[in-house]
Image (cartoon, grey):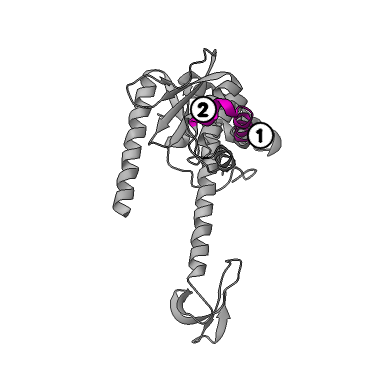
Amino acid sequence: MDGGGSMRSNEERVAEKQMDDYLKTIGLHRKKIAKDGSCLFRAVAEQVLYCQSYHTEVRAQCVEFLKKNRDSYEAFIEGDFEDYLCKLQDPQQWVGEVEINALAVMYKRDFLIYQEPNKPAVHITDNNFKDKVRLCFLNGNHYDSVYPISHMKGAAVCQSILYELLYTNVFKVDRSVLAGYQRTGRHFEVLSDDSMAACISSDESDGRGRGRHLSDRVRRSLNPTLFRNIEFDVWQRSKKAQQKLDFCIAAGMQYAVGDRCQVRLEGRTYNATIKEVPPNNSAVTVYVEELGRRWV
């Protein structure tokens, strides 16, 4: 199973690179969106309302629009219409062309979706609206945003200026410290950092006010030739945190009071007995016989 998962992951990476290479030849860039059931609403919120954080409102408005226009959309939905709308309210519920058609009418924007490398975008809606929402549909279930390269370059410059103001005026970091990361000579081969290795540092504020020790995230944000995809970065970090929590919960479920286990303390391994397993999945308490004491 692991091998299959790795193979699928490799196939996804190849498909993404082929699409990115094609989009670059026509002056476009794919901006990664969080890979969850709200990817379409995140992309629309960003392109229409200029903020991905409004994706829950966009979803709610879409549900309400479908409810009010039931006669126009019910025929395209399998199963009970009310049940469908109820499920659609779930932020993790995947969506498709029904919602795209509704969103197009709601925001008066036609949808152009790039689905295959070396092929033009498909006009999913054709309402003759002047404004467009440009998306990329990859791997059968995910939508990313598509922007002109010029837009991404401009966004990188604006982001750099914003972070300069934030760190000089709010965090009181000396401007000379920031200048080294804002030199236009520090070019990256990519427009956005969502295709680069994840930052090692943990917070936006790592190193603020501590001389030259600025975090990787801040350094990237200060570079006027590189756009840092903050929303995607935040989603990746929250996903890792959730996976860690899920692992802890699963591990906690495997143990019960009285179970025997081994613990490693100060470089040595000891046999122990589990004495307490908290209901909130926090650290368990064990008794180490050789040491004659309890450890958490």
- Dominant secondary structure of the magenta stretch? helix
Give the mark count: 2
Q: Position of residue 67 (x, y in %)?
A: 62, 32
Is label 1 in contact with label 2 (beta carbons under 8 Å)? no
Q: Is residue 59 visible?
A: yes
Depth check, front residue: 287 or 104? 104
Which residue position is annotated with label 1?
166
Magenta segment range?
Answer: 57-76
* Label 1, label 2: how far apart the Cα atoms are: 37 Å
| Quarter the N terminus occupies | bottom left
Query: Which mark identifies residue 100?
Result: 2
Image quarter of residue 276: bottom right
Q: Residue at x 61, y 44 (%)?
A: 205
Measured as percent of width and height from the top left, residue 149 is found at 46, 21
Dot 1: what SS? helix
**207, above or below 133, in the image:** below
Q: Is residue 64 magenta?
A: yes
The disc at residue 222 is none
Residue sitting at x 66%, y 30%:
165
